[in-house]
Image: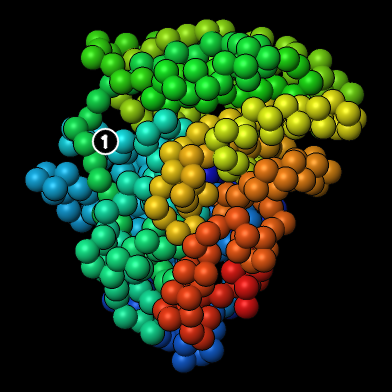
Amino acid sequence: MSTAASARNGTWRNWGGNVSARPAREVTPASVEELAAAVRKAAEDGLRVKAVGTGHSFTSIAATDGVLIRPQLLTGIRNIDRDAMTVTVEAGTPLKRLNMALAREGLSLTNMGDIMEQTVSGATSTGTHGTGRESGSIAAQIRGLELVTADGSVLSCSEKENPEVFAAARIGLGALGVVTAITFAVEPIFLLTAREEPMSFDKVTSAFDELWAENEHFEFYWFPHTGSTNTKRNNRSAGPEKPVPQLQGWFEDEFLSNGVFQVAQWVGRAAPGTIPSIARISSKALSARTYTDIPYKVFTSPRRVRFVEMEYAVPREAVVETLRELKAAVERSGLRVSFPVEVRTAPADDITLSTASGRDSAYIAVHMVKGTPYQAYFTAAERIFTAHEGRPHWGKVHTRDAEYFDAVYPRFGEFTALRDRLDPDRRFQNDYLRRVLGA
């Protein structure tokens, strides 16, 4: 229960604790046929349908007062095709299980986000991503999709089969149907060398283009109220494997990054005036380190401190200016921000509503610890992001609507037209989709 969303007394809550819903009923189908039957039954009863993964979205994208479909029995690998180098996996499979199963088979995804608790369908439907110069989001690695549409039929799509559905459904927001299986491109497992080191805010922003160009995967965290960042570069390596020693890993990744960080958040909540001092100490706590390991052990890390998050994709060439404006806004405002700001990149892709659709993108993510008021900070950040034609992550806090998206997504109308065709009665509608896609 710790990582997943929870349901008590018929109320569903997301991981961040900022969204709740009371579905009329919950269904846990054990097969695609059972899922299709649940959708047809919902239509007979005049109920809307939403599938939910582990509830890692901070928006109400999965909330419903109708039928809540939980896919935890639809898990596991259906098929590995070593000639095509693809793996087909059931929609409810957690990324963690997929990554570990692939590693046992000597295979890996090319890129991944930093959390692997989500289900594959939840992560891809909202556009979850890591960082990469040439490799895109998890959804950009999809080669085929199977989904149950509003009339209860099962539709398969790929570049060759129903290509217009494939273009949109890889990041479908749950608006086009319930995803039941995903086929991902995979490759032989490889090693990554990670180099983590502190760097000043001024240095990382002035050298950002070079750092991006010289590394396959570059990201950094800036600690508000300081001029300090922690940078991470991941590049493919010929080896040898040199993982973080177990005790050091526990100390840095669990004790410092989760345990001490959690205590610092509690202190900051109780006494906001101490946050700048805590930030200065935190930014110096993590020292430089280099290690080499298989991809999921480098890309992903445990996240035990609960938070609420807003993240926007801006054009990559605008990221430094956007970040400098954010830093100036925090310094001007009297806000006390105890959580680092995360910066990552992705290449342009061809997915209709991908935050990187048609443009090279950089992501800026702002966080607040669960339970602290985040509105003032997020509102200030959002004003800056939208001034740069930012596109919010579909699963993270934002206040944008269909009119805004129509302006920042050139193919927005293509998506809504497909939705009109696949779900004319809005079986998969909820308040969030009404706002972001229009009625």
Measured from the top left, where is residue 64 in percent x and y? 59, 71
Q: Of the residues shown, which amino acid type is indicated by label 1?
A: Ser
Above or below 372: residue 427:
below
Measured from the top left, where is residue 52 in percent x and y? 49, 61
Residue shown at the point (27%, 54%) measured from the top left: 143
Measured from the top left, where is residue 27 in percent x and y? 45, 72
In the image, is 86 to the left or to the right of 378? left
In the image, is 404 to the left or to the right of 26? right
Q: Is residue 57 visible?
A: no
Q: Which residue is mark 1?
A: 108
Q: Quadrant of residue 200?
A: top right
Q: Secondary structure at mark 1?
A: strand
In the image, is 199 to the left or to the right of 359? right
Q: Quadrant of the C terminus?
A: bottom right
Residue shown at the point (47%, 51%) measured from the top left: 357
Residue shown at the point (45%, 63%) measured from the top left: 172
Most foreground residue, 386 or 253:
386
